[in-house]
Amino acid sequence: MKRQHFIIAFSIILLTLSGTLSAAPKPSPNLPKVIFFDVNETLLNLGNVGKSISNALGGRSDLVPLWFRTLLHYSLVSNVTGDYHHFGEIGVAALKMVAQQHNIPLTDEQAAKAVKTPFRDLAPHNDVIEGLKIIKTLDVKMITLTNSSDAGIAAQLKNADLTTYFDGSLTVQQLQTFKPDLRVYHWATEQMQIKPEEAMLIAAHAWDIAGADKAGWQTAFIQRPGKATYPLADKPDLTGNTLIEIANQLKAMQ
């Protein structure tokens, strides 16, 4: 009986592996009708934000990644609890939490200044302008899709001189739900009146790519330094180290 049980269990494992290995590959990507762009870290360099956060935490640059993870964590808590706050507000709250956890004195005013001031005045990564120019020559609409507020993204694009490259901006403020909640991607395609497979997200965040993929979008991952794809999610349709590399792959689809 034990031998029979072993054979049955082993057969189940083989069938499971067979089903996994024989799964149909993703279809080759096509040039989408609308390309959505994440903004923070994808297009804009957050170096000034990191310096500001580090200064607020007494020079503890090692705590900056913890602050950003806390910010993302509590944006998801906001989704689950239905208690929406602007991304900047959550960023301030996250900074106060990190300061308290490490016994660093920080006033409410200092926390607000440290987060909100640099976020609205960020420079684009060195590859962004050229990459956007290449994509602008394609027959696609270019839309930013961000967790920032309406006022926040307007200021960011204006200060970075990127406004003219885009046909519009969508933020989660109206929906009051942060990416990577699938409702955001479904809502975005409805706003643009397209099918999910006609959309593509370009982002430098694995969690954003995973959400767009599950919503049926095509995806392009910019593997900026320190970034990696999520092993349990499907691979992005396109991958490149810069927006220029992604843009040239898109151009080849024409």
Image (tube, rainbow, N blue to C red):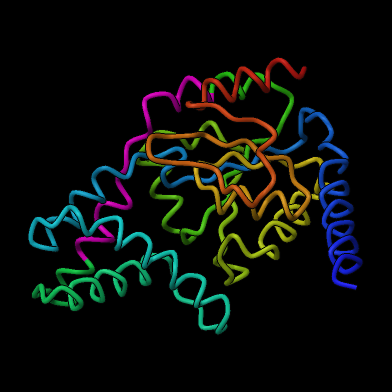
Q: Is residue 127 magenta?
A: yes
Q: Quadrant of the N terminus?
A: bottom right
Residue 124: give x, y in percent of width and height.
37, 34
Describe residue 139's horizontal placement relative to residue 56 as left or right: right
Q: Main secondary structure of the magenta part?
A: helix
Depicted 122 relative to depicted 165: above or below: below
Magenta residues span: 113-132
For the point 80% across and 40% down, which residue is it? Answer: 198
The foreground one among 253 and 150 is 253
For the point 36% across and 71% down, which residue is it? Answer: 89
Residue 76: give x, y in percent of width and height.
52, 71
Which quarter of the figure has residue 199?
Answer: top right
The foreground one among 101 and 192 is 101
- State the count of labels: 0
Depicted 178 relative to depicted 127: above or below: below
Residue 243: give x, y in percent of width and height.
51, 27
The foreground one among 89 and 232 is 232
Q: Quadrant of the C terminus?
A: top right
The foreground one among 142 and 226 is 226
Describe residue 82's horizontal placement relative to residue 242 as left or right: right
For the point 33% across and 51% down, which residue is it? Answer: 120
For the point 81% across and 37% down, which residue is it? Answer: 26
Residue 14: give x, y in percent of width and height.
85, 51
Q: Is residue 15 magenta?
A: no
